Image (tube, helix red, strand yellow):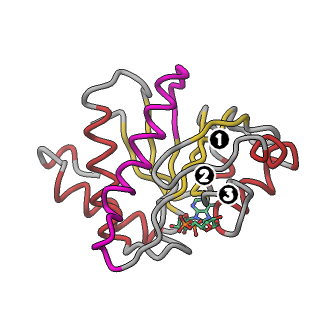
């Protein structure tokens, strides 16, 4: 699918209209990509987040991007990995669906994701990739917006897992392999 792609990069440098933040339910910042986004966006982002009253795991909330290149930040708290039998897959899928729905509702055309929950929250990468790609592909097959969605992996190793998962499940033929 040409509307979706996988790349290695730094989400902070993204030129997408919206970047997705792997947040926590307080929305008050943290480490990982959350910390990087807040550092790059500046203090005005935290000020706006303070007024949002937090966000449930699996849901998403929109803010401005402030000093980021991206115009918007979509904040979504992923599930903490607890072995896989505590509803983690459904909550992770909900992070991607909620973020995409929020983007579509605001007419946002390009969205870049990090690999939600696969850092501090400990979600195994291959399992997270399967959930993420399924949720993204199902959404794009039934919605005209966003026009472009990318998974921005922070390492070549992570991108390789996403590409392998993509090729296993979604590459209809050899030409569409990534
Ligand atoms: N660009 C792209 N991806 C990044 C970047 C970056 N600048 N920094 C980290 N990542 C990747 C990590 O390698 C990982 O694959 O983002 C993915 C998510 O990792 P985390 O940021 O640790 O997020 P998560 O696992 O969802 O844990 C969320 O961490 O930062 C805190 O406040 C946050 O409590 C929340 C928890």
Q: Give the magenta-colored segment's residue range.
A: 83-111
Counting from the top left corner in percent of width and height, residue 39 is at: 81, 57
Counting from the top left corner in percent of width and height, residue 36 is at: 72, 60
Q: SS at mark 3?
A: loop
Of labels 3 and 1, the one closer to you: 3
Q: Which mark is residue 21?
A: 2
Counting from the top left corner in percent of width and height, residue 79 is at: 45, 64
Q: Which residue is mark 1?
A: 73
Residue at image coords 71%, 54% = 37
Q: Is residue 38 magenta?
A: no
How far is disc 3 from disc 1 in space, using C-alphas? 15 Å
- Which comes sooner in the sequence, label 3 or label 1? 3
Whether residue 36 sits left or right of residue 62 in the image: it is right
How far is disc 1 from disc 2 in space, using C-alphas? 7 Å
Counting from the top left corner in percent of width and height, residue 145 is at: 41, 24
- Dot 1, crowdedness within 10 Å: few (<14), some or many (≥20)? many
Whether residue 145 sits left or right of residue 74 in the image: it is left
10 versus 48 height, above or below: below
- Look at the numbered disc 2 and say if its residue's Cβ is closer than 8 Å to ligand 1: no
Residue at image coords 88%, 49% = 43
């Amino acid at each position: 699918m040409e509307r979706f792609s996988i790349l290695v990069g730094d989400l902070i440098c993204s030129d997408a209209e919206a970047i997705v933040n792997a947040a926590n339910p307080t929305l008050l910042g943290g480490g990982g990509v959350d910390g990087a986004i807040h550092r790059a966006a500046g203090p005005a982002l935290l000020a706006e987040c303070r007024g949002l009253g937090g966000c449930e795991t699996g849901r998403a909330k929109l803010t401005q991007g402030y000093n980021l290149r991206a115009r918007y930040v979509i904040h979504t708290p992923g599930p903490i990995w607890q072995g896989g039998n505590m509803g983690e897959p459904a909550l992770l899928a909900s992070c991607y669906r909620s973020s995409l729905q929020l983007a579509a509702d605001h007419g946002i055309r390009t969205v870049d994701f990090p690999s939600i929950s696969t850092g501090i929250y400990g979600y195994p990468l291959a399992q997270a990739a399967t959930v993420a790609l399924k949720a993204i592909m199902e959404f794009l097959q039934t919605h005209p917006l966003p026009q472009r969605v990318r998974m921005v992996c922070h390492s070549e190793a992570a991108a390789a897992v996403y590409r392998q998962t993509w090729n296993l499940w979604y590459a209809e033929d050899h030409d569409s392999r990534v």
